[in-house]
């Protein structure tokens, strides 16, 4: 069991390249390091890293990216050492942007805990459950980019990695007891290989609120507008909402204006903006959407809404069975399958996640048996006690 340390122990504040190189050299000689980041993106498109906290061996460092070049962490990230993080997805995005690299090996305590019956648990809840430890309260709205930080703020940030060694020990031990170590390893590697940073700008429209209600030509226009907005936000490094709001995209896509005068009547756009360079860019995007709508054979789809109508009831059926399997196996349902996973399965998409790896171990051929009518769902007594959904053979 990893020895617990106290936040009264020395926390190193690293704010120079020389000190960071020394720390990285030290860290690369260890098998495991524990990492977290603090960042802001409220006023930028890309996340701006404000702190990097790393515990390794007998050292706990809080690194100041405003004074030290965090790309110097790259040798550690590229090393064979295991990186332990909690809820790593956003940290991976931050590291990818700031360092151009992510860890080569990863263990995510939140993800791994999902195989032990915890549903997207916070670090605080896991520490309370496994270590009977309560994190000190701090200002969740701290401006981590402000300097100087107080000693209390630095200590608060350091606490996010302080207990990770002991927490990892507890989770790994329970995973081993339940025979789920390999499942968690597969899931962590899947997370590590997930694309980081901005997604395909052509898919940005899927994140626009209320866009799924659009049909026909309007959907193409919305896709074109969101694509332009995403590229513009990247270019200026500002949030997409500062380029154009969701309500403007949906309104423009619904009404499909062709002239600055028509554009000026759109909610959220004043006449000055409609007749300026932004208005011209919007009208160009509208024209592009119209042109592609005329030339394409199929509409862009969202979240499986182009799934064959005869199969749509199967999404609900399989969702019910997956949720029941997750409950019986004490696994976070969202970890086992999302709606998108189920739709991919029904589409027979290549490498559908429900038919590979640990998910296939749990789901097996049950879904295919349900779809082919060889088995059905009923509600009744379960073999291990209690009542719930179960599979029965059909006559």
Image: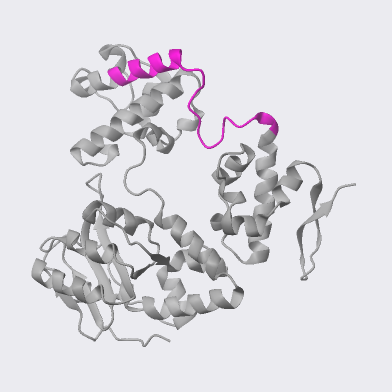
Q: Is 302 rendered above or below residue 89?
A: above
Find residue 166 and report its horizontal and vertical position in percent: 41, 81
Q: Is 154 rendered above or below residue 249?
A: below
Q: Residue at x 29, y 38 (%)?
A: 241
Q: Is 178 rendered above or below residue 254?
A: below
Find residue 163 and report its horizontal and vertical position in percent: 36, 78
Residue 377 relative to residue 305: left or right:
right
Find residue 93 and report its horizontal and vertical position in percent: 31, 53
Q: How is the image coloured?
A: one colour
Q: Residue at x 61, y 36 (%)?
A: 347
The stretch in magenta equals: 284-310
Q: Please tell me which residue lies in front, 299 or 190.
A: 190
Please say whether residue 391 is visible from this viewpoint.
yes
Is 289 colored magenta in this rendering? yes
Find residue 139 and report its horizontal and vertical position in percent: 27, 67
Is 277 colored magenta in this rendering? no
Q: Quadrant of residue 56?
A: bottom left
Please say whether residue 264 is visible from this viewpoint.
no
């Amino acid at each position: 069991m990893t020895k617990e340390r106290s936040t009264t122990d020395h926390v190193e504040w690293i704010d120079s390249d020389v000190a960071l190189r020394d720390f990285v050299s030290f860290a690369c000689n260890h098998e495991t390091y524990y990492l977290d980041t603090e960042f802001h993106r409220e006023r930028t498109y890309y996340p701006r890293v404000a702190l990097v906290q790393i515990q390794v061996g007998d050292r706990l460092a809080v690194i100041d990216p405003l004074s030290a070049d965090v790309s110097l962490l790259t040798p550690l990230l590229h090393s064979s050492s295991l990186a332990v993080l909690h809820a790593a997805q956003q940290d991976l995005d931050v590291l990818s942007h700031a360092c151009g690299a992510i860890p080569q090996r990863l263990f995510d305590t939140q993800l791994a805990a999902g195989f032990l019956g915890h549903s997207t648990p916070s670090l605080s809840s896991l520490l309370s459950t496994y270590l009977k430890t309560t994190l000190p309260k701090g200002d969740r709205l701290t401006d981590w980019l402000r300097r100087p930080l107080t000693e209390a703020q630095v200590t608060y940030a350091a606490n996010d990695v302080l207990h990770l060694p002991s927490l990892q020990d507890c989770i790994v031990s329970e995973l081993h007891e339940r025979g789920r170590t390999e499942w968690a390893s597969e899931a962590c590697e899947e997370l590590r290989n997930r694309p980081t940073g901005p997604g395909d700008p052509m898919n940005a429209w899927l994140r626009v609120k209320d866009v799924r209600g659009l049909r026909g030509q309007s959907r193409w226009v919305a896709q074109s507008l969101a694509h332009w907005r995403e590229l513009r936000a990247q270019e200026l490094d500002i949030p997409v909402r500062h380029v154009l709001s969701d309500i403007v995209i949906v309104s423009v896509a619904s009404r499909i204006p062709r002239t600055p005068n028509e554009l000026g009547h759109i909610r959220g756009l004043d006449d000055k903006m409609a007749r300026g360079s932004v208005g011209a860019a919007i009208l160009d995007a509208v024209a592009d959407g119209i042109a592609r709508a005329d030339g394409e054979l199929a509409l862009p789809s969202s979240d499986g809404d182009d799934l064959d109508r005869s199969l749509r009831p199967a999404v609900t059926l399989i969702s019910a069975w997956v949720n029941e399997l997750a409950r019986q196996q004490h696994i976070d349902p969202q970890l086992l399958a999302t709606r998108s996973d189920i739709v991919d399965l029904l589409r027979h998409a290549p490498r559908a996640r429900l038919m590979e790896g640990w998910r296939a171990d749990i789901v097996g051929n049950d879904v295919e048996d349900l779809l082919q009518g060889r088995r059905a769902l009923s509600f009744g007594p379960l073999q291990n006690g209690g009542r719930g959904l179960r599979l029965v053979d059909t006559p």
